[in-house]
Image: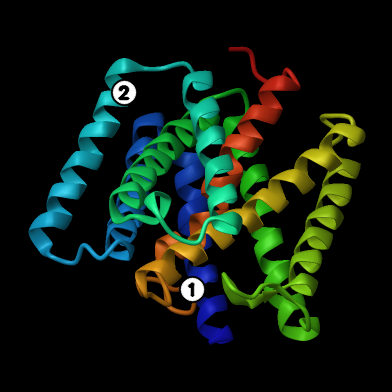
Amino acid sequence: MLKARVLTALLMLPLFLAALFYLPANGWMLFVAIVLLVAWDEWLRLTNISSIPRRVLGALLFCAALVGLLWFTPTVWWVVIPSLCLWLLFYVVTFFVQDGFFWSSGFRRLSGFLVLTCAWWTICWLRAQWYGAWWTLGFLVIIWMADVGAYFFGKRFGRNKLAPAISPGKTIEGALGGLSMVLLVTLVTHHFYPILPILWVLPMTLLVAMVSIAGDLYESRLKRVGGHKDSGSILPGHGGVLDRIDGVLAGLPVFIYLVLNMGVFSV
């Protein structure tokens, strides 16, 4: 399991970095759209849509929404604020609502549609900004370090369950290990590249990391409601694409909101 996980990561990382730094803007939009389209198909299957015609229809609707965003060209605030509100609702539902409307198939599909289309717009917007590829990579490193730290610290030291009713495999020790990894990488990176004050950077990175962990729990709850162990099997050792990007989806609007309020980008 661990070997497959590491090998998949080593094979995918160069492909992703090449896309991030060398694709033109339109190529990056297409690359991200393909990744999120796969994630959308997995989201549909988590809501028990398994028939090919319905999944194809879902893919067409998703692509139409992306084209609509390109045509409408909303400001980033029009996408980030609704995304933040939606994720806040997800967290409340994950921890305090056991069943009902918010766990109905229809709402889960609609929420996934909104989350993934908004994520496509915001990550494409981020990459198009000043040093956007580096800012995008910096954001993703926060998510990756939180995930890697949680995995290895959880395996080695995990004793106390973080949210046993939602995700029995996640532990408090793993979550703290993930946050510790983020803290360490932030301090080292800031030492060499002090772009923003450390008193801004530390809370920002830790908050984004904590939100990514909560996003992972929301996806775990989605899988439990739908009766699935993983969102898919396309990535050996990792499960599906959605299993790998749930933290990215949750952390992205928070990261964008924070850097905008810090005045990093002018909008």
Return the x and y of residue 180 as percentages of the image width and height.
84, 61
Against 50, residue 123 (above or below) is above
Indicate the position of residue 132 as horizontal and vertical percent values. Answer: 58, 31
How far apart in space, not on screen, are marks 2 and 1 (Cα)?
32 Å
Report the residue marked by disc 2. Answer: 70
- Residue found at x 77% / y 76%: 153
Q: Are marks 2 and 1 in contact (CB under 8 Å)?
A: no
Name the element at disc 2: helix
Quadrant assignment, res 173: bottom right
Q: Nearer the viewer, residue 149 or 28?
A: 149
* Callout 1 secondary element: loop
In the rendered structure, which amino acid carries the disc numbered 1? His
In the drawing, what numbered circle is on residue 148? none
Say above or below: 117 vs 9: above
Q: Which residue is mark 1?
A: 238
State the residue lying farthest toward the front: 100
Q: Report the amino acid beneath label 2.
A: Leu
Residue 219 located left or right of residue 96: left
Q: Is residue 138 left or right of residue 29?
A: right
> What is the residue that sits farthest to the left in this orientation?
53
Percent across and percent down for residue 123 are 49, 36
Q: Above or below — where is 261 with respect to 8?
A: above
Q: Is residue 94 visible?
A: yes
Closer to us: 191 or 266: 266
Q: At 34% across and 47% down in the image, what residue appears?
A: 107
Task: Pick whichever of labels 2 and 1 is earlier in the sequence.
Answer: 2
* The C terminus sits in image quarter: top right
